Amino acid sequence: MDVLYFAWVRERIGLPRERVETDAATVSDLVTELSAREDRYAAAFADLSALRVAVDQELTDFDAPLAGAREVAFFPPMTGG
């Protein structure tokens, strides 16, 4: 699946997107896998309350299933103004 990173998440990981082969059942499982890769991933995912996630371009929670998903995106909460 494609994993996309936006704003400071992208800056910490150093990539805007990557292709990931995973058996993760949920977004949370995927985060655990990614965090175990390198310190830069662990830093980006250290505080999940500061992140939002979308699966196939729909906002969802970290317990959302990944079965059949083609894309997961991580980004900070949006602010208006």
Image (cartoon, rainbow, N blue to C red):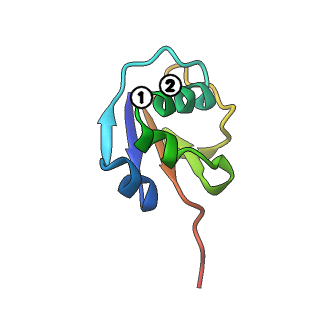
Residue extending farthest to the front is 39
Report the Cα–Cα distance between label 1 and label 2: 7 Å
Residue in front for this viewpoint, 32 or 69: 32
Q: How many marks?
A: 2
Which quarter of the picture shows residue 28? Answer: top right
Residue in front for this viewpoint, 10 or 73: 10
* Residue 20 horizontal side relative to residue 64, left or right: left
Whether 62 is drawn above or below 65: the answer is: below
User: What residue do we see at 63% from left, 56% from top?
Assistant: 50
Residue in front for this viewpoint, 36 or 22: 36
Whether 21 is drawn above or below 51: the answer is: above
Residue 53 position, x and y percent, is 57, 46
Label 1 crowd (10 A; few <14 / some 14-19 / many >=20): few
Label 2 crowd (10 A; few <14 / some 14-19 / many >=20): some
User: What residue do we see at 60% from left, 74% from top?
Assistant: 79
| Secondary structure type for disc 1 | helix
- What amino acid does circle 2 point to? Glu
Whether 23 is drawn above or below 27: the answer is: above
Which quarter of the picture shows residue 27? Answer: top right
- What amino acid does circle 1 point to? Arg
Rendered-image quadrant of the C terminus: bottom right
Q: Which residue is mark 1?
A: 37
Find out whether the residues at labels 1 and 2 contact each other: C-beta distance under 8 Å: yes
Residue 46 position, x and y percent, is 59, 46
Residue 71 position, x and y percent, is 43, 35
| Secondary structure type for disc 2 | helix
* Residue 22 horizontal side relative to residue 46, left or right: left
Which quarter of the picture shows residue 40? Answer: top left
Q: Which mark is residue 65?
A: none
Q: Which mark is residue 33?
A: 2
